[in-house]
Amino acid sequence: MYVGIDVGTSMVKAAAFDDTGRELAVSSRPVELKLHGGFVEQDMDEVYGAVVAVLDEVTGRAPGPVELAGLTGQGDGVWLVDGEGRPVRAAASWMDGRAHELVDRWLADGTFEEVFRRTGSAMFPGCPGPLLAWLDSNEPEALDAAQAALYCKDMVFQRLTGAGPATDVSDASMPFLDPRTRTYDNRVVELLGLTHRRRLLAPVSDPVATAEARGEGLPSGTRIANGPYDLPACALGAGVTAPGDGLLIVGTCLASLVATTELDLTGEPAGLYISTDRPGHWLRAMPAMVGTAALDWVLSTTGVRHDEVDALLAQTPPGANGVRVLPYFAPSGERAPFVEPRLRAELTGVCLESTRGDLVRATCEGIGYAARHCLEAAGLDGKLAVCGGGTRSPAWMRLLADVLGRPLRVVEGEVGARGAVLAAAERYGMPLDARVWTRPTQVVEPDPGRAAYYTKGYEEHLVRLTQARARART
């Protein structure tokens, strides 16, 4: 039995698999996001407690001993810990917007672009560089007290195993890692004014760190591997490894990933290059800030239940009777395929005759247009897989296939946990058949007529977006 752990932004999950990749048991537990005045934080003890709880449950329900475990989790943010991996302060989430003024300043003075040209990372307010710089100016005592500024999965790994602080090349990719040398670029640290905090950057384990569990959640002695983080883990779990193939993750974050062997640091700085466990292979990533979180907000505001979404989408025509949504709901603006910290969502075309179905469909269409923008910018020219919570809605998957104008290889289940296990198996030299583990559940074909309609709608979306970006800068 193999166990994958996926420490998500709003949900912590563990899944047990047999040697063919069949899910034997899944356990999940929600964790709280605390939002206040642009700050988005999480309680590390709550997150770690949720990890232990889901592991206890899934190992208790699944048969047989645990051969090995793979760990993945949300990326970015800052998780300040002491020598035991325990919190110095609340974790600042990747959704946090407190450092937007720093990013604005770096956009204006050229720092932002220079960092991208060196690392392929287009910084955004919730990534470690701006957050650490903000903390250095506003909460220096927290940095003084910390031994390391980790990423989410690294904190969990340290506490599960007692190993020292460490991260991997995927998490380190934003914003300090040189993708060619796979080591930290100290010039980037200097550009962000953090040379005196350089000690806080965790050592990069390449290949990923391994250790044995101490007995919390997993049986003592269980072998566990730390990484990659959730975006590349999902790519592994969906079988996206060939150059040109892509993955769309319709989760809290709307993430578009395309596998590549080409490193192009020219063009508009946006997204990032995620280093993978294979040197010379990257994922060109365009992780938009908000995916299902945008729909959740609309559902909550309109009083629509999740189980009503498919029926509303079926009842409402393409174009949502003139309602349009620019789905940039994050308090920190947008980060892909462009960086605009002050951009906000816009709803247009609403009138007294607009229905709940119009609002829901317009939101789903807007998310689809944002996904198409990201996938084009990432260079998709091969097959496209899709995973995440949004795949549970067949109507939304049909809508997405139409908006994107291409077939979708839908991969259901715990794709991130699956990828974490495959990464761990590779690290430990265990022969698991990745092709069997990553077979799609179904393939959704686009309707030619609706796809043509949405191609025109996408062009109109780009015009509205250009106008909204101009307003955000005034």
Image: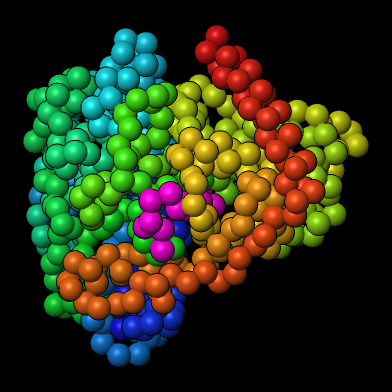
Q: Position of residue 53 (x, y in %)?
A: 35, 70
Which residue is pictured at 52% across the width and 34% down the height? 330
Looking at the rendering, which quadrant does residue 137 occupy? Answer: top left
Q: Is residue 111 visible?
A: yes
The quarter of the image holding the N terminus is bottom left
Q: Position of residue 268 (x, y in %)?
A: 42, 23
Residue at x 69% of width, y 55% of height: 446
Counting labels gives 0
Q: Is residue 242 magenta?
A: yes
Residue 19 painted magenta: no
Q: Going by the image, does 165 lie left or right of 243?
A: left
Say whether residue 361 is visible. no
In this orientation, which residue lies closer to the viewer: 280 or 142?
A: 280
Query: Magenta part of the protein: which range?
Result: 239-252
Rendered view: 302 above or below 189: below
Q: In the image as oriented, which residue stretches furthest toward the right?
A: 353
Image quadrant where residue 14 sits: bottom left
Q: Quadrant of residue 123?
A: top left
Image coords of residue 118 (percent x, y): 23, 27
For this view, does 108 lie left or right of residue 334? left
Residue at image position (40%, 35%) is 271
- If the image is split into quadrants, where does the C terminus sit? top right
Judging depth in this view, the residue of 253 and 33 nearest the camera is 253
Q: Foreground: 375 or 424?
A: 375
92 lies left or right of 312: left
Q: Residue 393 at what x, y percent from top left?
A: 66, 61
